[in-house]
Structures are given as structure tokens and as C-alpha cells.
């Protein structure tokens, strides 16, 4: 059949290690045989980030603002070991963090559910989407290791030079540790709007939780801003769609989530979202079965897998060994981006292709063919057949061809 034509390119951000290998394999087996794939390519692999002083990451984010839709491979955030391994000029920041800051985006993560792999929480029947405020808090905190006795103070001086606030944090009688963190009303408001809009777009209830009873200024600001945005901009739309906005304390939310059947968006502050997204993905089966999309307040989208670069498998690959690395989240990053590109450009063929490729992925697993990580979780009637990554992609392609022929 003729290849599906694209009118506007996707921003393509390549990555590192095993996911970089899978990235090309996915394109070769599942995408370019069917689509005249148009992308603006950026290599966010660690060597190229080091070579360009991380300018390549900034350029990729700016391109996303221009074209509106991006798809990203998993990348390394270097530590001291990686600095030595890759002979880096410096310990570069997380590419995801840089892109989030430039797009002012909110991260939404949801599990890919298949029959035969049951969530650890048995009453979870529908996906739970985690919305993470990817700005500020502990990730932008200023820290100090207190070496001796002394007084720590919180001080604010306005732009005119007038000190308007001073309060003792603690009089240290011994060494300790100190941390100062912040957030901004503008970022919190963008986060709220992104969450409410995503709930409207997906027609799901939205839950939000902080600890405002303890943090009466910091967390309470989040609560107040969410309520203001909801009342002024979204309440009527939520009522029309029959969906609910629900606020509660974070500890109460955890208890409610465990008892629920799923099927809603759970909005979390930065640290809570970081932790809870891994908890939810693991409880649903595997981090390799978790989709992730960064959404900006002005409607820019960056799709990626929620997991890392699978270093252990990459070292096996370098030795010439076959690996059974799960490509599902990376495939769904591509399908998410292609579907959104098709929606924005009014290309129903592209949207249909993305839908059929996702169905082919799920059908392949449900028929018993899967990667090794899923075989260990399998509860289906058909015996699990664990295959290497390339064989899994070829099995998906066979199922996709059947879908496209119908």
C-alpha cells in the first residue's frame, strides 16, 4: 500500500544506550515501511550533548515549541560514574528537566493495560494517570550542610531592597542540614490549567492532593490556585461532561487510590509525582508499560517512555548478546506523537495507523508473545513465549499487517 503522507514534521529526539538501539529498530520495522516519516532530528545522546555544551537539548525544546509535537527517546542524566565513563566536560542536567522548564510543561503518565497481566492492586480495573508538576520544589532547592552550631533564617528582600520577612528556621545546637525550596504562582497556575484541560480532553475525573494542613503557606497555595482556576475556567465544562474535580490530603489520596478501581487523573506536586508514578507503574506491572507525555499550557506535546536507557541490556548488546528489552513504552511514545500530529494536521490515516499499531502491540502480548520482563508477570491462559526485542517487533508487525488489511 502507499505510504501515509505527513504534512508537518515531528521533532525527533534520539537518546542513549539500549533505548537508542530500539529507537532505530522501531522505526525500521514498524514505522518507515508504512509512513513517509517526516521528522526534524535532534541527537540528545550524551556524547552529542557534551559536544554541544547541551545546546542541542535547548534547540530540541525550541523546535517543539515551533512544531507542536515531539517524540523523545530515553536519555542518560549523568552522575560521577557517567562523567568518567563518557569523559564528559561537566555533569550535564537532565534533558527532561531542561525541556520541561522551556515548555513550562506538566507530565502525564499512564499504564498500558493488557489482559493476562493483572495489577498488584487487584481492584484496579482502569488506568490511573499521574500528572506531575515538573517544576521547582526539592528539584530546584538550595541546600547547605550545617557544620556547627548557629542560627538558620528565612529572609525575603523585595526588589526595592527592603527586607520584608525574616524568621528563624532553627537554632542549631549541633551539625545538621538545611534546605530552601520555592515555587511560582505562574507555574502552579500553568500546572492547574494543564491538568484541568487534560481531564476535559480525556473525559476523566481529576484528583489533586497536597499536605496543606501542615504546609499552610506552600502547599496551601497549590490548593488555592487549583480551586481558583477550576471555579473560574473549568467548573462549567466539568459539569457539562459529568466529570469531577476532587481535592484531598496526600495521605488520604494514597488510601483512596489503593481502594479505587482507577480511571482518573491524579495530580501531584513534583516530588509526589516522581514517587507515585513509579509506584503506580510498578503496581500495574512494569515501568516499561508506562506512557508519558509532557503537555505545555499552550498545547505543545512531547511524548516519551517513562523508563530509563536500560543500561544492563546495553552492555549485553555490546557483547553481541541478544536482549529481551521491552519496547512497548517507546512504541507508544511514537504512536502518541503520530496520533497527535494527525489530529492537529487533520490526517485521519495517521491517527488510524497509530490506533492500529497500539492494538497490534496489545494483541501480540495477549496472544502470548512478549519480552522476558512480561513473561514473569503473565497470568494468561496461553503459555507465555518470551522472545528477544527484534522478534517481538516482528511479531507486532505481523499483527499490524493484519489490522491494516482489514
Image: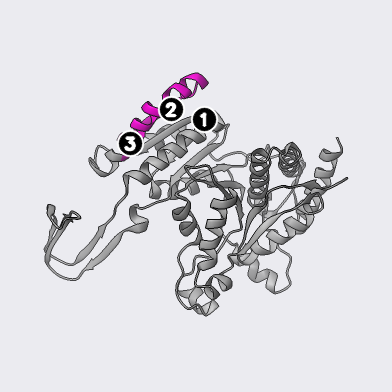
Proximity of marks 1 and 2: CB atoms separated by less than 8 Å: yes
Residue located beneath label 2 in the image: 234
Neighbours of disc 2 within 10 Å: few (<14), some (14-19), many (20+): some
Does the magenta run of residues contain 94?
no
In the rendered image, which quarter contains the C terminus?
Answer: top right
Does the magenta run of residues contain 235?
yes
Q: In the picture shown, does residue 376 fall above or below 41? A: above
Magenta-colored span = 222-248
* Side of 184 relative to 153 (left or right): right
Q: Secondary structure at mark 1?
A: helix
Neighbours of disc 1 within 10 Å: few (<14), some (14-19), many (20+): some
Q: Earlier in the sequence, mark 2 or mark 3?
A: 3
Residue located beneath label 3 in the image: 225
Question: Residue 113 appears in which quarter of the rendering?
Answer: top right
Residue located beneath label 1 in the image: 200
Proximity of marks 3 and 1: CB atoms separated by less than 8 Å: no
* Label 1 to label 2: alpha-carbon separation: 9 Å
Task: Give the residue drawn at x 68%, y 46%.
Answer: 338
User: 302 or 274, which lies in front?
Assistant: 302
In the rendered image, which quarter contains the N terminus?
Answer: top right
Task: Give the residue drawn at x 69%, y 64%.
Answer: 21
Query: Is any part of residue 218 visible from this angle?
Result: yes
x, y percent for residue 200: 51, 30
Q: Earlier in the sequence, mark 1 or mark 2?
A: 1
Amino acid at each position: 500500500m502507499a505510504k501515509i503522507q505527513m504534512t508537518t514534521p515531528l521533532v525527533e529526539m534520539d537518546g542513549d544506550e539500549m533505548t537508542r538501539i530500539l529507537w532505530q529498530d522501531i522505526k525500521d520495522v514498524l514505522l518507515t515501511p508504512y509512513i513517509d516519516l517526516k521528522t526534524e532530528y535532534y541527537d540528545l545522546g550524551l556524547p552529542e550533548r557534551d559536544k554541544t555544551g547541551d545546546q542541542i537539548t535547548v534547540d530540541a525544546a525550541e523546535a517543539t515549541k515551533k512544531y507542536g509535537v515531539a517524540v523523545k527517546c530515553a536519555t542518560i542524566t549523568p552522575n560521577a560514574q557517567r562523567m568518567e565513563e563518557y569523559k564528559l566536560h561537566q555533569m550535564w542536567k537532565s534533558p527532561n528537566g531542561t525541556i520541561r522548564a522551556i515548555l513550562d510543561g506538566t507530565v502525564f503518565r499512564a499504564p498500558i493495560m493488557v489482559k493476562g497481566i493483572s495489577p498488584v492492586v487487584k481492584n484496579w480495573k482502569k488506568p490511573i494517570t499521574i500528572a506531575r508538576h515538573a517544576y521547582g520544589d526539592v528539584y530546584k532547592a538550595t541546600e547547605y550542610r550545617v557544620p556547627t552550631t548557629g542560627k538558620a533564617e528565612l529572609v525575603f528582600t523585595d526588589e526595592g531592597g527592603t527586607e520584608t520577612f525574616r524568621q528563624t528556621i532553627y537554632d542549631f545546637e549541633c551539625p545538621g542540614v538545611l534546605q530552601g525550596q520555592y515555587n511560582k504562582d505562574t507555574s502552579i497556575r500553568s500546572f492547574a490549567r494543564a491538568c484541568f484541560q487534560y481531564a476535559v480532553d480525556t473525559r476523566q475525573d481529576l484528583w489533586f492532593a497536597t499536605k496543606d494542613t501542615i504546609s499552610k503557606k506552600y502547599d496551601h497555595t497549590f490548593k488555592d490556585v487549583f480551586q481558583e482556576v477550576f471555579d473560574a475556567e473549568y467548573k462549567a465544562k466539568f459539569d457539562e461532561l459529568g466529570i469531577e474535580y476532587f481535592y484531598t490530603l496526600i495521605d488520604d489520596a494514597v488510601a483512596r487510590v489503593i481502594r479505587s478501581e482507577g480511571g482518573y487523573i491524579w495530580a501531584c506536586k513534583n516530588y509526589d509525582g516522581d514517587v507515585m508514578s513509579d509506584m503506580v507503574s510498578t503496581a500495574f506491572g512494569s515501568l516499561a508499560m508506562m506512557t508519558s507525555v509532557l503537555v505545555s499550557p499552550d498545547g505543545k506535546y512531547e511524548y516519551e517512555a517513562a523508563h530509563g536507557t536500560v543500561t544492563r541490556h546495553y552492555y549485553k548488546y555490546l557483547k553481541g548478546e541478544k536482549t529481551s528489552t521491552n519496547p512497548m513504552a517507546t512504541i507508544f511514545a511514537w504512536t502518541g506523537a503520530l496520533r497527535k500530529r494527525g489530529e492537529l494536521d487533520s490526517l485521519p490515516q495517521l491517527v488510524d495507523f497509530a490506533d492500529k499499531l497500539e492494538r497490534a502491540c496489545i494483541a501480540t502480548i495477549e496472544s502470548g508473545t512478549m519480552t522476558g520482563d512480561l513473561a514473569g508477570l503473565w497470568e494468561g491462559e496461553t503459555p507465555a513465549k518470551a522472545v528477544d526485542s527484534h522478534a517481538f517487533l516482528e511479531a507486532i508487525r505481523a499483527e499490524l499487517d493484519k489490522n491494516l488489511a482489514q
